[in-house]
């Protein structure tokens, strides 16, 4: 109760502000329409008219909720009008990018920790790579990957998602693989352990808590990347494409519903990754 | 009996082997603008010609030209201005057919802004699409003598997104619309036709050719490919004429192919009705006078013309001549 | 083909040079630390140039770095105009407003544990959301000029910054706060003298995240409507015209601006939080 009540209070506050804002923002249209029709309207007449417009500037919560429900439960999940279907497409893209990002991040981290020259030459560029706005690169990634014969439109999407998600993994893994201190390393040397053994028996296990801690950030980044990849790249399926289509066809409700579906997906992903993290920590005997 | 079955089997095998694969890249998302191709597919017109056609929808950041160039698709739907721009950039695309006889592009203005003729554009904000679609607009403005850099006495140009919001939110006095698409979104939003003023590019004499079929020049030298394209154009035009005659059925076929699930029946039926007006009178053959007018208009595109010299060999009548001969 | 071979040889030579520097005493010096990544960058460009020319990749697929550099040199005024619109008018004001208001809100709810417990989980959640999806909506609300771009940036940076600031304000230790109490320090004194300085590493962490988000937000928003200049406008328009050299020129400017913004934040951080263990060298 102690934790739920404050959250609910804040949420209720947001809903109230939202309703007030949608009345205020949607009213302009009602007044404009009345002026064009040559009539005048009072505020008492305006408010009901702001609640159910076809193209609201800011749809009130119940309209978004209804559209979201229609999209999630209103039809078969295989239907192209179903948000579950589009959500799954985005989920698939996110997972592909997430997997690719993890592999790239871990491999790069291993090379960086092992070779000083990799550390010195690649690490600064890895940081710079994240300051390049991915949206500027997205069209180029699509052009290039289609040139390489990767006609599947999932591939560029996954590359964009991986571009964003490899970085947190890389940074945490570099930290984690370097976590064992000199004493532990020396001990293994006295055992006559080879470099490979040191890596497998000491460095890798030591890096695991860091690894799992980075996953939450990485999965969120991967979702953002997937949606950015779906927005302008002509993807025809997925939540990002729905947002774009909603904007293009002037259907704000579709746009809002997809936005909230994306939020639900983000929540699910974070919960799942959090669960995996807890499971792994328990198995490795890390307290908490 | 046995002999007959063997013959039938062999015949089936033969057609199976000779089915020619064609990949068509659209310029935009699945909608009635491309009804002819979807109809030709659904009604089996392509199959009758022995073609196996895959239709790939486009999107805002897909430049069909790049896909055509790296051989991912065989033929694309594009507008002539952007096709000619690509040609000058070193991608030798050639127009082989022109299903759209006239242009559907126009400027739609709110009457309340006081605009009644193009002369009133001065000091107003106008919404324009970019991505290669801005050239007809720029050449129109330079013909009107209006500057587009936002200086006083000229017009302020706004790059509009993919919807009509700038007009509804009064951020622009006029926006670009297609007769078959965005115009109706304005109407759907609750603005009536008599509250609007429209200027069709066709009426202003600045129209450029829209949806045409383009292929790569060197591929066309291959007689087998040429033969495939003849069949493709013939079947596509049959699809277009069917769509013109049966707009409602065509719209439903388009809807079945829509992968986004965001298109509505009402909108697609209306779009089909408007698109039919643009394809009317075209048998697929390119009107060379219209193409030359497009080139002239592009060459005069102000300080930053889309093409710097008149293209040579940017269109050919070889395919349509053969397709129409039979 | 010769291009390819030359490029590969140069690449290998530069890589060998890097390996040598990394193993030599030079690697401990400042010059070495700067040289190695620079040489690596040059090697990548050489390889890119060689691949594009050697394999005769079409210009409309991937232009060589030399063509991009020539384009940058030829269109400096345009690039400057675009950067001024997108970065100076869109990203930076949005960054300042978003981060500033997040810090203010964090301080405002500092005295109410109830609000904190309510806002923090929501803030954490929203910080993980793909806020870029709001871009078309905000463009509809705030018009096509820089205001809508700044608004998208504000929406993107606000929650990551808020979460970091709230966490930072709780970073001072119990003992330190007790000490302040025994000295009879007021709430405000404790805030200014102890808790805000202690929060600085967290604040700068938030600022660094926000600095990369700011550019993304400003550029995406331009895809959904803009005046006829700006980096996002130029990128989407030139992709349509197949002017890929210009697209890459804009990407280069964006990378430079992004690194610069990040670098400035890091420099200020070093100056403000000189006492923190992570800044000791």
Image (spheres, coloured by chain):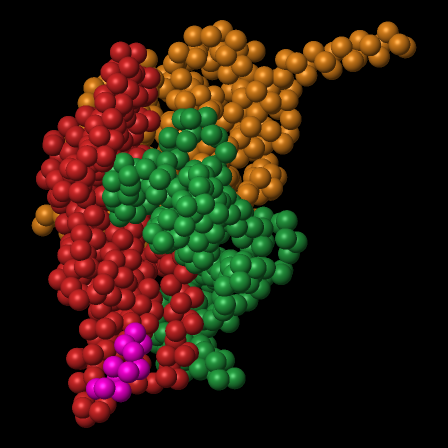
Chain colours: A green, B orange, C red
- Residue at x-position 47% and y-position 30%: A150
* Residue B257 higher or lower than A209, as above or below: above
Depth order, front residue of B54/B286: B54
* Residue B196 higher or lower than C25, as above or below: below
- Residue at x-position 39% and y-position 53%: A184
Is B87 left, or right, of A259 in this rendering? Answer: left
Q: Which residue lies furthest to the right in this view?
A: B1
Report x, y in % for residue A258.
Answer: 48, 57
Count of residue discs: 0
Is A73 left, or right, of B78 in this rendering? Answer: right
- Residue at x-position 63% and y-position 53%: A77
Report x, y in % for residue C23.
Answer: 23, 34
- Residue at x-position 28% and y-position 20%: C8
Q: From which residue to which does the magenta span run?
A: C170-180
Q: Is residue C127 visible?
A: yes
Is A252 left, or right, of C188 in this rendering? Answer: right
A250 falls in the magenta region:
no
C173 falls in the magenta region:
yes
Look at the magenta stretch and give its main secondary structure. helix
Report x, y in % for residue A37.
Answer: 37, 68
Image quadrant where residue C112 sits: bottom left
* Residue A276 higher or lower than C258, as above or below: below
* Residue A27 higher or lower than B9, as above or below: below
Report x, y in % for residue A42.
Answer: 37, 81
Depth order, front residue of C5/C126: C5
Image quadrant where residue C1 sits: top left
Depth order, front residue of C86/A283: A283
Image quadrant where residue C198 sits: bottom left
Q: Is residue C155 visible?
A: no
């Amino acid at each position: 109760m102690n934790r739920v009540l404050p959250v609910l209070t804040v949420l209720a506050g947001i809903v109230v502000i939202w309703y007030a804002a949608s009345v205020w923002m949607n009213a302009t249209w009602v007044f404009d329409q009345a002026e064009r029709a040559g009539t005048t309207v009072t505020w008492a007449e305006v408010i009901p008219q702001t609640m159910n417009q076809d193209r609201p500037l800011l749809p009130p919560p119940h309209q978004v909720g209804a559209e979201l429900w229609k999209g999630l439960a209103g039809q078969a999940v295989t239907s192209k009008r179903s948000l579950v279907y589009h959500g799954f497409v985005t989920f698939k893209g996110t997972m592909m990018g997430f997997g690719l990002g993890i592999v790239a991040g871990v491999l790069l981290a291993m090379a960086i920790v092992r070779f000083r020259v990799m550390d010195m030459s690649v690490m600064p560029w890895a940081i710079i790579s994240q300051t390049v706005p991915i949206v500027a690169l997205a069209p180029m990634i699509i052009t290039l990957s289609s040139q390489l014969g990767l006609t599947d439109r999932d591939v560029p999407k996954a590359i964009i998602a991986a571009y964003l998600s490899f970085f947190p993994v890389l940074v945490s893994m570099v930290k984690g693989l370097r976590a064992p201190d000199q004493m532990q390393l020396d001990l293994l040397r006295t055992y006559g352990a080879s470099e490979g053994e040191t890596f497998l028996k000491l460095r890798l296990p030591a890096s695991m808590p860091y690894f799992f801690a980075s996953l939450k950030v990485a999965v969120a980044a991967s979702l953002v990347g997937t949606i950015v990849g779906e927005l302008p790249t002509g993807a025809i399926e997925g939540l990002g494409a729905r947002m774009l289509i909603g904007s293009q066809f002037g259907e704000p409700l579709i746009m809002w519903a997809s936005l909230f579906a994306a939020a639900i997906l983000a929540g699910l992903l974070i919960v799942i990754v959090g669960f995996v993290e807890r499971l792994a920590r328990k198995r490795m005997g890390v307290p908490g | 009996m046995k002999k007959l079955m063997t013959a039938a089997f062999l015949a089936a095998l033969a057609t199976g082997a000779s089915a020619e694969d064609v990949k068509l890249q659209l310029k935009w998302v699945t909608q009635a603008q491309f009804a002819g191709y979807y109809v030709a597919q659904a009604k089996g017109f392509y199959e009758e010609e022995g073609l196996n056609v895959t239709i790939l929808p486009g999107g805002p950041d897909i430049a069909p030209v790049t896909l055509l160039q790296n051989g991912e698709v065989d033929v694309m739907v594009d507008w002539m201005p952007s096709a000619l721009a690509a040609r000058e950039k070193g991608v030798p695309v050639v127009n082989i057919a022109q299903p759209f006889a006239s242009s559907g592009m126009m400027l739609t203005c709110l009457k309340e802004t006081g605009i009644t003729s193009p002369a009133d554009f001065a000091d107003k904000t106008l919404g324009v699409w970019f991505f290669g679609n801005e050239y007809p607009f720029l050449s129109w403005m330079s013909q009107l003598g209006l500057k587009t850099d936002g200086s006083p006495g000229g017009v302020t140009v706004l790059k509009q997104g993919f919807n009509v919001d700038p007009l509804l939110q009064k951020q622009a006095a006029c926006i670009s619309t297609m007769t078959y698409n965005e115009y109706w979104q304005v109407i759907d939003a609750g603005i009536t036709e008599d509250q609007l003023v429209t200027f069709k590019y066709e009426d202003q004499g600045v129209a450029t050719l829209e949806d045409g079929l383009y292929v790569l020049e060197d591929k066309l030298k291959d007689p087998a490919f040429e033969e495939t394209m003849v069949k493709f154009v013939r079947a596509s035009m049959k699809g277009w004429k069917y769509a013109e005659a049966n707009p409602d059925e065509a719209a439903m076929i388009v809807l079945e192919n829509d992968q986004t699930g965001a298109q509505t029946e009402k909108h697609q039926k209306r779009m089909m009705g408007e698109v039919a007006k643009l394809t009317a009178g075209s048998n697929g053959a390119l009107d060379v006078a219209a193409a030359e007018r497009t080139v002239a208009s592009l060459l005069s595109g102000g300080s930053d013309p889309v093409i710097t010299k008149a293209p040579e060999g940017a269109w050919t009548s070889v395919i349509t001549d053969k397709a129409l001969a039979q | 083909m010769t291009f390819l071979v030359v490029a590969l040889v140069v690449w290998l030579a530069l890589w060998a040079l890097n390996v040598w520097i990394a193993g030599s005493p030079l690697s401990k010096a400042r010059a070495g630390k700067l040289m190695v990544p620079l040489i690596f960058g040059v090697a990548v460009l050489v390889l890119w140039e060689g691949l594009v020319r050697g394999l005769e990749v079409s210009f409309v697929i991937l232009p060589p770095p030399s063509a991009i550099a020539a384009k940058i040199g030829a269109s400096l005024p345009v690039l400057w105009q675009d950067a001024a619109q997108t970065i100076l008018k869109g990203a930076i004001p949005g960054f300042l407003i978003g981060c500033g208001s997040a810090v203010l809100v964090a301080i405002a709810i500092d005295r109410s544990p109830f609000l904190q417990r309510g806002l923090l989980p929501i803030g954490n959640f929203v910080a993980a959301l793909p806020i870029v999806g709001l871009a078309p909506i905000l463009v509809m609300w705030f018009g096509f000029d820089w205001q809508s771009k700044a608004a998208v940036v504000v929406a993107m940076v606000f929650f990551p910054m808020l979460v970091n600031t709230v966490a930072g304000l709780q970073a001072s230790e119990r003992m330190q706060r007790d000490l302040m109490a025994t000295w009879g320090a007021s709430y405000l004194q404790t805030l200014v003298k102890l808790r805000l300085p202690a929060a600085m590493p967290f604040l700068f962490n938030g600022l660094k995240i926000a600095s990369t988000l700011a550019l993304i937000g400003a550029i995406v928003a331009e895809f959904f409507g803009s005046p006829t200049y700006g980096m996002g406008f130029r990128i989407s328009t030139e992709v349509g015209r197949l002017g890929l050299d210009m697209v890459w020129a804009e990407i280069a400017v964006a990378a430079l601006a992004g690194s610069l913004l990040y670098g400035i934040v890091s420099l200020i951080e070093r100056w403000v939080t000189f006492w923190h263990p992570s800044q000791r060298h």
